């Protein structure tokens, strides 16, 4: 009976999953343009969990940490932004807890915990300050980190981010919560740790993060807030994020949804991101996309 219930619940999850994160297949066209991986390793977080990272690009350039979306690891940017960013930065990609080869660790998965992991990573690599790019939950984490550890941030680009659950469109949030409940029930009737891990990772989108717009006033670095024209976040929420960060600018990707913003990597994202870096003198004015 227990096995039958687990099988039923697994099927239910498959049928009711609301896609909120992932890179479209158009990225495959650029997957062969991957830069050389200069370093791969693990740092030990505060609770002893091993967190995976990799480094690409010019080791003497300014660092750029790229943070993936919920449930995905450090390879999520392989076929899209990473090749270009590695032309200009020392790029550090990270697999958050429970993804890639990173360990789950103990306790509840929260953005505060992952922010602490990122702080340990920077300390371990001897990086005093870094540029941040984060997509979806990675964008949320980048914002949380910039609020908590603003002295360690050089610039900030969140994409498809929200600062609290109220920023997510109700149709998407219902799907997120429903899937979380299904995983909670499934984990109750299963001894499979993978199911419990999926539940905990999914749970990061339920009630997290929990920032207020006034918290964003603490961020005092060049910021470009990116979101899609048909993103899963309310446009009013995205615009208020921009307005709440002093001096921040925004980019609404016309035709883009949440993950489908990456369909416009070479047409919109890369030119706009490089333009942002040039405008803020982070990159030379004569830089142009290499890919």
Image (spheres, grey):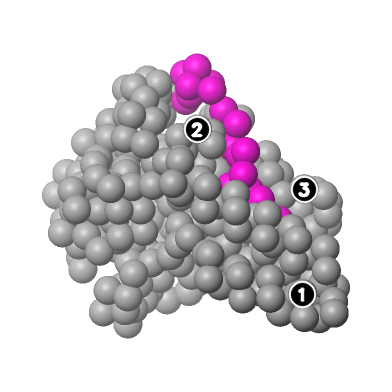
Q: Relative to 248, does residue 143 appear above or below in the rendering?
A: below
- Left or right for 165, reference 80: right
How far separated are the C-alphas under marks 2 and 1?
33 Å
Image location (x, y in percent) of residue 110? 68, 44
Determine the secondary structure under disc 1.
Answer: helix
- Left or right for 180, reference 223: right
Determine the secondary structure under disc 2.
Answer: helix
Report the residue at 62% width, 38% height from top: 207
Does the stretch in magenta take in 207? yes
Does the stretch in magenta take in 52? no
- Quadrant that contains the C terminus: bottom left
Mark closest to the chain's N terminus, 2 or 3: 3
Q: Nearer the viewer, mark 1 or mark 3?
A: 1
- Quadrant that contains the N terminus: bottom right
Residue stretch in magenta = 200-219
**Residue closer to the observer: 136 or 100:** 136
Residue at the disc numbered 1: 5
Q: Using the rendered image of the protein, determine whether residue 184 is visible from the camera's viewpoint.
A: yes
**Residue closer to the observer: 208 or 50:** 208
Image location (x, y in percent) of residue 90? 44, 57
Q: Relative to 196, does residue 114 appear above or below in the rendering?
A: above
Report the residue at 54% width, 23% height from top: 212
Mark closest to the chain's N terminus, 2 or 1: 1
Query: Which residue is situated farthest in the front direction here?
Result: 1
Residue at the disc numbered 3: 108
**Residue closer to the observer: 186 or 1:** 1
Q: Quadrant of residue 150?
A: top right
Say whether marks 1 and 3 touch (CB < 8 Å).
Answer: no
Residue at the disc numbered 2: 166
**Residue closer to the observer: 111 or 65:** 111
């Amino acid at each position: 009976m227990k096995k039958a219930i687990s099988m039923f619940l697994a099927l239910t999850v498959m049928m009711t999953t609301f896609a909120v994160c992932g890179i479209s297949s158009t990225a495959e066209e650029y997957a062969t343009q991957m830069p050389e991986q200069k370093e791969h390793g693990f740092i030990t977080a505060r609770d002893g969990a091993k967190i995976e990272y990799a480094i690409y690009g010019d080791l003497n350039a300014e660092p750029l940490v790229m943070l993936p979306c919920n449930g995905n690891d450090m390879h999520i940017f392989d076929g899209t932004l990473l090749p270009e960013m590695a032309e200009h930065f020392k790029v550090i990609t990270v697999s958050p807890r429970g993804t890639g080869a990173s360990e789950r660790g103990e306790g509840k998965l929260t953005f505060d915990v992952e922010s602490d992991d990122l702080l340990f990573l920077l300390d371990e690599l001897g990086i005093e300050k870094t540029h941040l790019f984060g997509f979806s939950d990675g964008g949320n984490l980048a914002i949380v980190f910039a609020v908590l550890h603003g002295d360690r941030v050089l610039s900030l680009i969140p994409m498809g981010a929200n600062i609290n659950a109220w920023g997510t469109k109700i149709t998407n949030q219902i799907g997120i919560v429903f899937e979380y409940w299904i995983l909670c029930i499934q984990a109750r009737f299963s001894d499979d740790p993978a199911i419990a891990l999926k539940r905990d990772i999914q749970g990061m989108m339920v009630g997290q993060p929990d920032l207020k717009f006034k918290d964003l006033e603490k961020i005092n670095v060049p910021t470009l807030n990116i979101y899609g024209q048909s993103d899963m976040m309310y446009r009013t929420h995205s615009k208020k994020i921009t307005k709440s960060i002093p001096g921040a600018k925004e980019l609404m990707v016309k035709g883009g949804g949440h993950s489908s913003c990456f369909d416009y990597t070479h047409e919109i994202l890369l030119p706009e991101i490089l333009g942002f870096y040039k405008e803020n003198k982070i990159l030379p004015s004569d830089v142009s996309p290499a890919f």
